[in-house]
Amino acid sequence: MKIVLLFDLSIPLKPEQYAEYLKTDDWASEAHILATLNRLGHDVIPLGIHDDLDLLLRELKREKPDLIFNLSEAFGGDRRFEPHLVSLIELLGIPYTGATSNALNISKDKGLAKKILSYHRIQIPHFLISRKASPMQSLADLKYPVFIKPLNLEASEGISQLSFAETKKDALERVRYLHERFETDVIIEEFIDGREIYVGILGNERLSALPPRELYFREVPEGEPKFASFKAKWDDDYRKKWGIRTATANLSEDMIERLEEICKKVYRVLGLCGYGRIDLRITPAGEIFCIEANPNPSIEKDGDFALSAIKSGMSYDEVIQKIINLAFAPEPGDTPRTGTRRKKK
Ligand SMILES: Nc1ncnc2c1ncn2[C@@H]1O[C@H](COP(=O)(O)OP(=O)(O)O)[C@@H](O)[C@H]1O
Ligand SMILES: [Mg+2]
């Protein structure tokens, strides 16, 4: 297959500059996926886009790919535009991997996604939303401690130790800070104390739940709040110091079954397809809360999704090929009329 490997660039770069940059550490996961696609026998054209739509359209028209392997997460450095790039691909009628623009739009709004989950009786933390244009003045009805995060950012951007607040004063201060510093709306959730679990899902109609992974905080003292702050995700020294790492979760068969059922339901009701990862918390009493659904999660070879798929018996190459196959497989709710949506024009 002729595949365009689409990814976002934080700075504008010309296609002829990719080769050098793909060798750097920052691009290790794109480079590895590129190598994997080549090994699978595909003809791959890497295409990095910062904010040049003309370049994107020109390249797609010139190359006429059979498929876009979509690794893009932003446009012009802005993550809010991630779904729009997929909308454009949908208008062009080119098959692509992963989530639809609609699913991205829904899941990226943590409040909207939680309202839908709650309608479908999936347990979520109670929450309130503070709009930047009219910041919240009180936090009625929420139980403390609360957890404050940007409404539609990812990768724990804007999440630090101060995201955990035990008083109204501290919470509102953090809300104000996020409005100003990140220029974003804010979601304030009840803090769910418990184990942090990630479940990868592969599929469109028939879903496979991959073995759950857990985020461990081995050196964080008992009684301290534990959560994946920006530092806990990205700062290697900090992770080492506090023993923060993921590994296969050690859970009972019964718990794994309950998690699988919940995660498949979350995936379906939010309209995810291709591949996704559901983030959850399990309280000491064994209650399961959905924290977040991630369409198009990272599929780098050392990431949780890939490691979990490998644990289930797949090879990394099989994971990548499966994601490709799913781009052509029927989606949930497809009727013969809309089923042509992904056919090439
Ligand atoms: N309500 C909550 N209770 C406890 N921890 C939370 C809650 N919401 C988020 N967290 C912690 O913050 C991390 C990041 O939050 P999440 O909503 O997944 O945002 P992101 O999109 O940045 O990953 C989670 O992995 C979890 O550790
Ligand atoms: Mg998350």
Image (cartoon, rainbow, N blue to C red):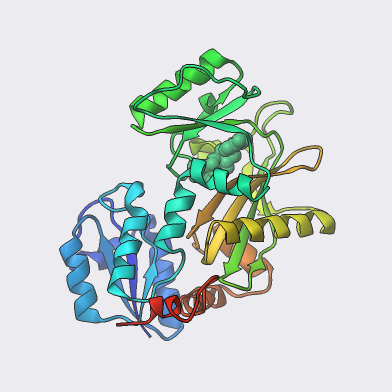
The residue shown at (47%, 81%) is 336
Name the quadrant of the C terminus. Answer: bottom left
Q: Position of residue 114 (x, y in %)?
A: 56, 44
The residue shown at (45%, 24%) is 175
Residue 51, quarter of picture:
bottom left
Counting the numbered discs, the total is 0
**Res. 150 in view:** yes
Q: Is residue 165 left or right of residue 101?
A: right
Q: Please state which of residues 94 and 136 is positioned toward the viewer in this rendering.
A: 136
Q: Is residue 129 left or right of residue 93?
A: right
Q: Position of residue 29 (x, y in %)?
A: 43, 62
Q: Position of residue 99 (x, y in %)?
A: 46, 63
The residue shown at (50%, 58%) is 295
Q: Please state which of residues 299 and 39 is positioned toward the viewer in this rendering.
A: 299
Residue 136, quarter of picture:
top left
The residue shown at (68%, 44%) is 123
